[in-house]
Each structure stands twice: as structure tokens, then as C-alpha cells.
Image (cartoon, rainbow, N blue to C red):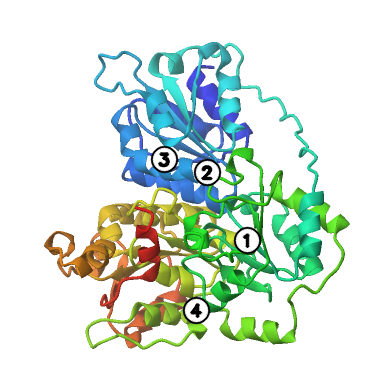
């Protein structure tokens, strides 16, 4: 058995049954060995798309994905997607063939590239191939695994044996300070972040603890859906918060962040948390405690474990729960309940009206994937999701153009659900080549393009100051026709009535992806972008 075969067998034995990528000479044998070992290889048309597909698959399943690319340019083509995955701490093993000779055209500084975005790095050695790959897999984050070309062909003396993972019980945490804060609070709010979504049993433990102490529930944008269906859920905290959520979070006397760093997006640059509120934070990473703002109570531990331990020592109190507040949350807790003036005209549809209409049309079992841009709040705020796996937010690197491929990864992961990719027209054009992949896969995919014929964020950021905007405005293209050219179906939407073909597609077999070119109004900038630009 050579090293390429050993690497493939170890990964499949660990449960990594999907690999995404693009084939070149450096990973040809490796990818075939993965398939021979029982894995599925999912090809993209560009390495950047492959990286985002792997990221989307891993986030949707909660399992480690595999990405395999060609040496040199294959790695650099994938780099933006890798940065997003690394900054999101997505469990992803990147099999990167390596030309170690500095004079080779394919030589790049792989350790330096990995370090640049905060990814782990492992270089496989022939005599320790299985152990090296196993160590990378068990890091449960994005790790670049360098596979020197000569090493891949070498014999793997130890074969592909995979020892069982050693048990690592959660470390004991003294929850007394947090339990004391909960007992003293009269208006507690829990804000759960990405870390809570990765803690086994966290939803159940947090809901039980919130019920015990009368807390309200909210999430960061990245954890949207975690508390879906809970009557005391305020949905998202931060720039996407409803007026009611902002009011109630701002009135809390205790805010507990579970697996959330309370960054500027989640707290509206700190303004969302009242001056007199006690702030507590629970995170598995001690370095994350207090990283964005001072906290009064800091606990380094697993979210679910801490919540269960607190439940055991916390007395039952009503908090600020009561019939009147429950009725307010039911009546005002969703963005669609907030009144607005429709800005639509005969040629363009208001993005709020579009999003509400889609929310009514789409099946409840859905996965919503959000690209980056001025548009992104509309699908994030108006499209409901069934659970935490139903929402993918590709914003850790704030790159435009990752949403489509991430949605493809999610569709591969959950073919039982409809996947909805929400994109701007700039991000759509940047990633449109992966529509060919979508058509090939026959994925259950609906692509909704919020098309304002511009890079809207820049228009609304620089326009009010009188700067010329010619460089950030785009021609009004027929994006539905572009989609049909790639083998997908396409429809243009300018009014609510134009959504009838979408309803018909939803009622059919959905075997051919549908792209909706929604010509949206663009008179106003999004307030969440105003918040974002405060950080630049």
C-alpha cells in the first residue's frame, strides 16, 4: 500500500465519506484511492467552488469534510474558500499535494499559506502517514495536509490502521459564579453562537436552563435556527434583530453568551447590551473569553455541560416571562410582522416583499445559505429555517461569491431538503460557473438572486458622500438566461405575480436547479451594512 492509498483509507475509516475537489496530476491517484476505499468524490468546476462546497457540507452535517486539489495553483485557487472555513473553524481536511522543490513551477509556501488564515498544517511522512492524517482529522478544524508528490508514491510501512479515538471527558467547570448570576437576575437573556451549535445537546440543555430561570433566547447570526419553534425565542441578536428583540435584549439585566464572542455584529458595536447589565460568557476556548468586550463572569467549558451543571444548582424563577410578553413575542417576533412601505415599482420588486412571498412558497424543511452583500439581511431576516442546520452564513471572511458553492455542499449533505442559495448579482456572476456543477448533480437547489445591478454595499456606502459610482454599477443582465446556458432553469421576477413559475417548479420534481433573477429595488442602503462599515 502506498501513502496515497493509506491516506484515503484512513479518512474513510474515520467517517469522512465525502471529498470535494478538482482533479489534477497531483491528486489523481489520491482521489481514486478515496473512491476505491468507499468514499464519494464530488467534482467542482473550480477549486474555489470545491472549497466552499466542502465547507457547506461540513457545516450542514456537523462532520469533517475532505477537500482535494492539485498542487500549486489548485491550492491558491481554493484559498478564499479555505479562509472562510478556517475563520469559521469548519472541520475540513485539505489534501494539498506539494511540490517541495523551490524551483518547481508548482512550489508554494504551504505552511505559510495555512498560517495566513489560521488553518492548521500537517506534512505527511511516509513512515507515519496514517498517524499524520489521523492527527489532522481529529483536530476538528480546517487543516492543510501537505502530501509531497514523492511521498504519495512511497510505501506506507504502517498501512492504514486507525486506532480508536481516546475518550476526552469535558473538564470540570465551577459553575457557581454563573449560577449565582442566574439566581440574581430578573431579566436574563441567553445569546447562543456558533460554539453552541457544535456542542452536543446544547439546544436541549440551554432551553431547559432558560425555562428554569425565565430567560429569553437569542442567537448570533451564525447560529440562527438553533431555537426555532421555541415560544421565548427572539431569533437573531445584532444587526438582524427585530425591533422587539433589540428592545428586550437591551433591557436585560443579565446577558449570557454561550459559544458566542459577542462581537460587534452580535451586539451592534456594544450598543445592544444595556450599561448596567451583567455579562457572562461560556466558551470552550479560554482565549475567546472577553476577546471583544469585558465580561463579568467567564467560564471555559463545553456549552451543553455548563448548562446542564447550572440546571442542577439553579432554582426555578419566572424571570420576565409572562402571558403578556409571550403574546408580544408571538405577534412582533418575526420581521414579516414589522410594517413597512413597499418600494416596488412596475420594473422592480421590493426585496422585503420578495422574501416574504418566498417564505410563504418554500417548504418548511429547507436549508437557507446566504452570500455576502447589501442584500443579505433580507433572506436572513425574512426566511424562516427549521433548525440550526437549516441556515448557513458565509460571513467569517466577508467575501462575496461563496454562497452558491456553499449551497451546493449543503444540497449534497441534505438532499431531503430544498436548499435555497440567496445571492446578490455580483456574487452570482462571480460564482456562476458552479451552476454547471449544480446542473450535473441535479441538486434540489433554488438560487435567488437579489439583483440590483450593482455592488450595492459600495453604492450605499460611498454614494451619500457624492463619490462617482460608475465603477460599482453593473449592466442590467439577463441572469436567468445565463442560468439556462449552464443547464439550469431560469425565471425573471419583477412583481409578486412573477413568482408563479417558482411555485410550479416547487410542485414538480425539482431535479433541475432553478435560478430566480429577482430585479429588486435599490433606493435604500441596508442598516446592517451601516453597522458593518463601522468596523472598517
Residue at 32% x, 56% y: name it. Answer: 435
Q: Is residue 260 left or right of residue 502?
A: right
Residue at 56% x, 78% y: name it. Answer: 244
Residue denoted by label 3: 82
Cα separation between marks 1 and 3 = 27 Å
- Per the rendering, the mark at residue 335 is 4
Whole-percent x, y for residue 448 in the image: 36, 69
Q: Earlier in the sequence, mark 2 or mark 3?
A: 3
Residue at 44% x, 32% y: name it. Answer: 31
Residue denoted by label 1: 191
Instruction: Name the foreground residue: 68 vs 89.
Output: 89
Q: Earlier in the sequence, mark 1 or mark 3?
A: 3
Cα separation between marks 3 and 4 = 33 Å
Where disc 3 sits, the SS reads helix
180 in relation to 352, above or below: above
509 in relation to 75, above or below: below
Where disc 4 sits, the SS reads helix
Where disc 1 sits, the SS reads strand
1 vs 3, front mark: 1
4 vs 1, front mark: 1
Residue denoted by label 2: 90
Whole-percent x, y for residue 274 in the image: 59, 66
4 vs 2, front mark: 4
Q: Residues within 10 Å of mark 3 (few under 14, many from 20)?
A: many
Question: Is label 1 in contact with label 2 (beta carbons under 8 Å)?
Answer: no
Amino acid at each position: 500500500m502506498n501513502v496515497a492509498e493509506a491516506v484515503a483509507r484512513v479518512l474513510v475509516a474515520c467517517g469522512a465519506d465525502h471529498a470535494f475537489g478538482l482533479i489534477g496530476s497531483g491528486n489523481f491517484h489520491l482521489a481514486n484511492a478515496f473512491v476505491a476505499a468507499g468514499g464519494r468524490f464530488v467534482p467542482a468546476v473550480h477549486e474555489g467552488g470545491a472549497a466552499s462546497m466542502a465547507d457547506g457540507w461540513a457545516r450542514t452535517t456537523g462532520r469533517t469534510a475532505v477537500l482535494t486539489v492539485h498542487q500549486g495553483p489548485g491550492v491558491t485557487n481554493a484559498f478564499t474558500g479555505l479562509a472562510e472555513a478556517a475563520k469559521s473553524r469548519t472541520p475540513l481536511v485539505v489534501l494539498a499535494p506539494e511540490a517541495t522543490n523551490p524551483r518547481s513551477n508548482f512550489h508554494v509556501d504551504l505552511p505559510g499559506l495555512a498560517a495566513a488564515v489560521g488553518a492548521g498544517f500537517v506534512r505527511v511522512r511516509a513512515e507515519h502517514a496514517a498517524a499524520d492524517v489521523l492527527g489532522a482529522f481529529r483536530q476538528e478544524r480546517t487543516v492543510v495536509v501537505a502530501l509531497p508528490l514523492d511521498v504519495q508514491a512511497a510505501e506506507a510501512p504502517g498501512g492504514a490502521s486507525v486506532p480508536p479515538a481516546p475518550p476526552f471527558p469535558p473538564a470540570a467547570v465551577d459553575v457557581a459564579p454563573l449560577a449565582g448570576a442566574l439566581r440574581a437576575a430578573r431579566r436574563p437573556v441567553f445569546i447562543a453562537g456558533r460554539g453552541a451549535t457544535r456542542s452536543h445537546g446544547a439546544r436541549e440543555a440551554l432551553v431547559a436552563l432558560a425555562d428554569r430561570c425565565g430567560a429569553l433566547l437569542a442567537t448570533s447570526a451564525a447560529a440562527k435556527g438553533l431555537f426555532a419553534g421555541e415560544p421565548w425565542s427572539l431569533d437573531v441578536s445584532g444587526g438582524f434583530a427585530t425591533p422587539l428583540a433589540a428592545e428586550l435584549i437591551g433591557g436585560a439585566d443579565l446577558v449570557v453568551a454561550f459559544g458566542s464572542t459577542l462581537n460587534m455584529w452580535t451586539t451592534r458595536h456594544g450598543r445592544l447590551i444595556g450599561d448596567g447589565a451583567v455579562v457572562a460568557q461560556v466558551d470552550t476556548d479560554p482565549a475567546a473569553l472577553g476577546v471583544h468586550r469585558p465580561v463579568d463572569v467567564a467560564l471555559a467549558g463545553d456549552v451543553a455541560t455548563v448548562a446542564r451543571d447550572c440546571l442542577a444548582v439553579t432554582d426555578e424563577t419566572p424571570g420576565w416571562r409572562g402571558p403578556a410578553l409571550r403574546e408580544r413575542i408571538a405577534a412582533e417576533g418575526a420581521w414579516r410582522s414589522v410594517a413597512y412601505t413597499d418600494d416596488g415599482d412596475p420594473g422592480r420588486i421590493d426585496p422585503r416583499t420578495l422574501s416574504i412571498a418566498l417564505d410563504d412558497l418554500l417548504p418548511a424543511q429547507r436549508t437557507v445559505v446566504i452570500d455576502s452583500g447589501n442584500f443579505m439581511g433580507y433572506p436572513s431576516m425574512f426566511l424562516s429555517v427549521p433548525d440550526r442546520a437549516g441556515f448557513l452564513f458565509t460571513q467569517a471572511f466577508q467575501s462575496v461569491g461563496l454562497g452558491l458553492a456553499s449551497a451546493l455542499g449543503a444540497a449534497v449533505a441534505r438532499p431531503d431538503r430544498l436548499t435555497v442559495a440567496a445571492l446578490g448579482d455580483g456574487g452570482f456572476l462571480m460564482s456562476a460557473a458552479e451552476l454547471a456543477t449544480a446542473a450535473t448533480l441535479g441538486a434540489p437547489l433554488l438560487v435567488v438572486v437579489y439583483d440590483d445591478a450593482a455592488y450595492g454595499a459600495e453604492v450605499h456606502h460611498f454614494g451619500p458622500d457624492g463619490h462617482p459610482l460608475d465603477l460599482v454599477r453593473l449592466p442590467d443582465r439577463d441572469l436567468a438566461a445565463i442560468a439556462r446556458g449552464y443547464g439550469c432553469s431560469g425565471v425573471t421576477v419583477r412583481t409578486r405575480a412573477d413568482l408563479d413559475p417558482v411555485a410550479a417548479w416547487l410542485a414538480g420534481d425539482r431535479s433541475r436547479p432553478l435560478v430566480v433573477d429577482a430585479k429588486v429595488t435599490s433606493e435604500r442602503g441596508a442598516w446592517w451594512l451601516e453597522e458593518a462599515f463601522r468596523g472598517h
